[in-house]
Image (tube, grey):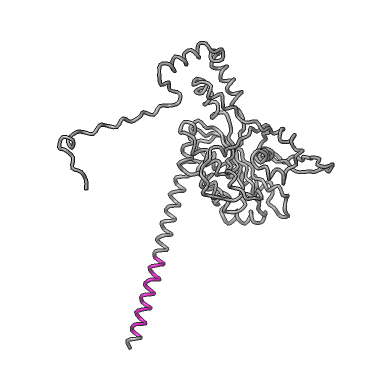
Amino acid sequence: MTKRKHPAEAGAPKPKRQSKKRVAFTVPKNATTKALITRNATDSPLLRLPLEIRNKIWTEVLGDRLVHIDYYEDDSSFDSDGNFSINKDIPYNESAWRHVICRDDRREDSPPRRVTSNLGGTEHVYWDRAHSICNLDYDRKSFKVLDRQHYDPQDDANWLRCGHDTMRLSILRSSRQIYVEANEILWTTNTFSFTEPIAFKHFMSTRNVHQKRLLRSLRFEQEWFFPECSKGWNNALLLPMVRSLSGLRHLRLHITHSMEATLYESVGVSSLPKWPLNSSFCEGLEKLSILPIQSVEIAMVSPLYGARVGEWTEEQKKEAAGRIRHLLLNPNGAEVYAEAQREQKEWFRKEREREAAIKAQIRREHEEFLARQRRIAEK
């Protein structure tokens, strides 16, 4: 039973809860911090330099790089043999991030290089595609079992050629003024590269609004082998997240896809030369057309296991890549995407009405059948 309050207590107003005002990291909170910032600006030899020179220093330390980023689950994602196993219940782990700075950047459509290595006195030949060494560096840092099984330990020179350096982000914690100046350099001058949609999704979900708006350049490496492959990127490139990237101006795409030339021709004829724009592979990329992107570098390549007989030609790959580039660089991309969404909604509405009409017709015919059966039974 609830205890009855005294009239004086019941009439007393409740004290208002004092809400804490959220302030940015760069805002000084007390006089001591303000004095320290002022002293640094006047006494530090580095911070006394002109802003133009300081920006060149921040760029040299943190900017103008291609940064490969990936997100690895913890050891519970692997079985006893070192094989990866999907576990959707694993929570987000901040320590699972890996990144490397690419030092062998090339155009996305550059041909693979022929690389040789010697292991046990035997010469091995393999094809080094752009950024494949960067992916080896990921595996070398995180998946020791895979290193021993698949990779030549004498290929250190190739890893070093690409570089396994990481970003020197500790400079951002040295002072507030450096954070304010260098943070913008970090997000506006670097290209952030992702090979897995889950890494991109986690990365963007942990960025604040200001960082997303500052981001200028992205690189995606996608594999279009089966329709199921598109689900990950389509779920990562959701419309609210895409809209938050209002500052994105440059996009690089490296798409691996295998198709027979005759199939490409038949798809092009039957789809009114719109493939791959009308496929599930492009659902996520299509959303990026609403952004004011200024440059798109794209390459569609076949898997490195070797060319198959009758595989689609280089001209067909360039034609498909050109369609995607035209979609992303369309200055009226936002209006085109909105109109396509309206048409799609209208199509689904008509489909629902058609299915409802078919179900109603089947129901009427079934009821008429039952009525005829009852009349026959009564006779």
Q: Main secondary structure of the magenta part?
A: helix
- Residue with the most extreme top position: 43
* Residue 243 drawn above or below residue 376: above
Q: Residue at x 20, y 43 (%)?
A: 3
Q: Quadrant of residue 363?
A: bottom left
The residue segment tinted magenta is 357-376
Which percent across, then down, holds residue 338?
44, 45
Nearest the eye: 351 or 2: 2
Task: Work out whether residue 84 or residue 339 is closer to the camera in this orientation and state it.
Answer: 84
- Residue 358 colored in magenta in the image: yes
| Residue 285 screen position, x and y as percent | 54, 44
Looking at the picture, tell me which residue is in the foreground, 128 or 173: 173
> Residue placed farthest to the bottom in the image?
379
- Give the answer, above or below, for where 56 lies relative to 242: above
Rendered location of residue 367, percent (x, y): 36, 75
Residue 198 image offset from top left, x and y in percent:
55, 44
Identity of the residue drawn at 50% across and 14% down: 40
* Residue nearer the viewer, 293 or 203: 203
Relative side of 186 to 81, left or right: left
Q: Residue 191 vs residue 19: left or right? A: right
- Which residue shows up at 50% across the image and 11% down it? 42
Q: Residue furthest right?
A: 121
Task: Tell me the quadrant of the picture where the C terminus can be found.
Answer: bottom left
Picture quadrant of residue 26: top left
Residue furthest left as drawn: 7
Q: Is residue 368 magenta?
A: yes
Q: How many discs appear?
A: 0
Q: Is residue 126 left or right of residue 23?
A: right
Name the residue: 52% across, 34% down.
Answer: 248
